[in-house]
Image (spheres, rainbow, N blue to C red):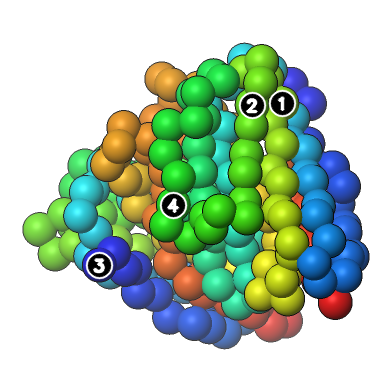
């Protein structure tokens, strides 16, 4: 089967750093993506790792270790507006579709 | 670039009725995906199109579901004989073939089957 595991919820305070982990088990692997979704909103793309290592985009960084089937999203200098659900997703090239297989999401609550 | 749009944003229907949703992708995107999301879960893949061709369907997509993309632009998702278990957010996403890492999602259609 195909599965992605991530914590269901994380709480942190403004200005802090938080790490959201994701482990995956999928038949195909062509990259790990992270999406943010606010309540009632659409998922929006944050970051993507195709190769091992760290990708940095402003306050957000994402890491991938393909040998460990593991990645994480790091959010720095947390702001209240970062309160949202965060999903890791694996790009599955099976069938040439490039569809995304999503984890169940991590609900991040940022407290003052 | 006006983004991906979906219509309607909300739909309430009675069990057994048929419903149809529309998705307008970003204009130059040739790949279009439909996902379903229930509360507290991540989006689940339903089907995808490359231009007008439907190239893959999930096992989740029962024969009551049908999707089309007749001219390779907008797409429709129809659910026949709706069931309460169909209640969910239906999300559409699009991307270009060469843009491997990013799918652009629409705001979704929230379906409630009574």
Question: Is residue B102 visible in this depiction of the protein?
Answer: yes
What residue does disc 1 label? B74
| Res B58 label | 4
On what subunit does the disc labeled 4 rest?
B
Whether pointer 1 and pointer 2 mark residues with C-beta atoms closer than 8 Å, the reply is yes
Which quadrant would residue A41 be assigned to in this image?
bottom right
Which chain does the numbered disc 2 sit on? Answer: B
In-image side of A25 versus B31 (left or right): left
Q: Can residue A59 be seen here?
A: no
Q: Position of residue B33 (x, y in %)?
A: 55, 39
Q: Say whether disc 4 or disc 1 marks the residue closer to the N-terminus.
A: 4
**Same subunit, tags 2 and 3:** no
Which comes sooner in the sequence, label 1 or label 2?
Answer: 2
> What is the spatial separation of the Cα atoms under label 1 and label 2, in whole angstroms?
6 Å
The CA span between labels 2 and 3 is 30 Å
- Label 1 resides on the chain identified as B
Instruction: Tell which tag, 2 or 3, sits nearer the viewer.
Output: 2
Q: Is residue B17 left or right of residue A104?
A: right
Q: Which structural element holds mark 1? A: loop
Residue closest to the eye, B81 or A27 = B81
For label 3, the residue is: A1
């Amino acid at each position: 089967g195909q599965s992605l595991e991530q914590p269901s919820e994380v709480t942190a305070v403004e200005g802090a750093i938080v790490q959201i982990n994701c482990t995956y088990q999928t038949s195909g692997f062509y990259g790990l993506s992270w999406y943010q979704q606010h309540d009632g909103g659409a998922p929006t793309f944050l970051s993507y790792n195709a190769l091992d290592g760290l990708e940095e985009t402003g306050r957000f960084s994402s890491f991938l270790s393909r040998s460990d089937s593991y990645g994480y999203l790091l959010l720095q200098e947390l702001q209240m507006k970062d309160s949202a659900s965060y999903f890791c997703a694996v790009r599955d090239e099976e069938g040439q579709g490039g569809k995304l297989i999503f984890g169940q999401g991590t609900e991040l609550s940022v407290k003052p | 670039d006006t983004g991906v749009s979906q219509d309607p944003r909300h739909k309430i229907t009675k069990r057994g009725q048929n419903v149809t949703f529309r998705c307008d992708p970003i204009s130059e995107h040739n790949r279009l995906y439909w996902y379903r999301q229930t509360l507290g879960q991540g989006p689940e893949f339903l089907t995808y199109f490359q231009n007008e061709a439907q190239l893959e369907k999930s096992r989740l997509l029962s024969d009551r579901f049908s999707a089309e993309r007749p001219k390779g632009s907008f797409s429709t998702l129809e659910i026949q004989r709706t069931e309460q278990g169909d209640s969910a957010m239906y999300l559409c996403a699009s991307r270009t073939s060469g843009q491997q890492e990013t799918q652009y999602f629409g705001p979704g259609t929230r379906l409630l089957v009574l």
